[in-house]
Image (cartoon, helix red, strand yellow):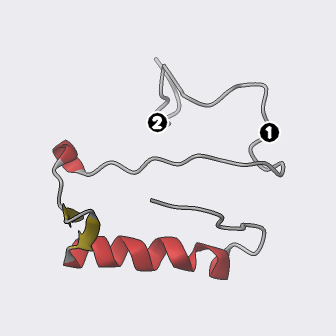
């Protein structure tokens, strides 16, 4: 019987030989529940954010404010 209640992900996407606290460029993907397109819609080639999308935008832009080692270069 496993004595720890720690959940482990069998197929982790993390490379076991990389120290993720080291400087580097990282690509992060955020998915919504059931991949529902609830963050906004594209109209005439422009992204129109929903209320939920505006919350996500605000939080992404705030990341450098509370993680002083992060430089936010690009996001979509």
The circle drawn on residue 11 is none
Left or right, 31 with respect to 23, comes to left
Q: Residue placed farthest to the right in the image?
A: 22
In primary-sequence order, the first of circles 1 and 2 is 2
Pointer 2: what residue? 5
The circle drawn on residue 19 is 1
At 58% across and 46% down in the image, what residue appears? 27
Q: How many marks?
A: 2
Which corner quadrant holds the C terminus? bottom left
Left or right, 26 with respect to 11, comes to right
27 up-or-down from 6: above or below: below
Cα distance, mark 1 to mark 2? 25 Å
Left or right, 75 with respect to 26, comes to left
Q: Position of residue 61 (x, y in %)?
A: 53, 76
Residue 30 versus residue 73: which sits nearer the camera?
Answer: 73
- Closer to the eye: label 1 or 2: 1
Q: Position of residue 11 (x, y in %)?
A: 49, 20
At 83% across and 52% down in the image, what residue appears? 23
Q: Residue placed farthest to the front in the image?
A: 44
Q: Position of residue 34 (x, y in %)?
A: 17, 43
At 51% across and 61% down in the image, what residue appears? 75
Image quadrant of residue 57?
A: bottom left
At 50% across and 36% down in the image, what residue appears? 6
Assign a secondary structure to mark 2: loop
**Do the CB atoms of the residues marked 1 and 2 lie less than 8 Å apart?**
no
68 up-or-down from 10: above or below: below
Using a 10 Å C-alpha cutoff, classify the residue at mark 1 as few (fewer than 14 neighbours), some (14 to 19) or many (20 or more): few
Left or right, 45 with respect to 60, comes to left
Using a 10 Å C-alpha cutoff, classify the residue at mark 2 as few (fewer than 14 neighbours), some (14 to 19) or many (20 or more): few
Assign a secondary structure to mark 1: loop
């Amino acid at each position: 019987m496993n004595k720890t209640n720690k959940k482990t992900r069998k197929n982790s996407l993390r490379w076991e030989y990389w120290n993720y606290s080291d400087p580097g460029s990282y690509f992060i993907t955020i998915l919504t529940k059931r991949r529902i397109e609830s963050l906004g819609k594209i109209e005439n080639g422009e992204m129109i954010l929903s209320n939920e999308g505006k919350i996500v935008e605000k939080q992404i832009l705030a990341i450098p404010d509370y993680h002083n080692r992060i430089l936010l270069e690009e996001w979509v």
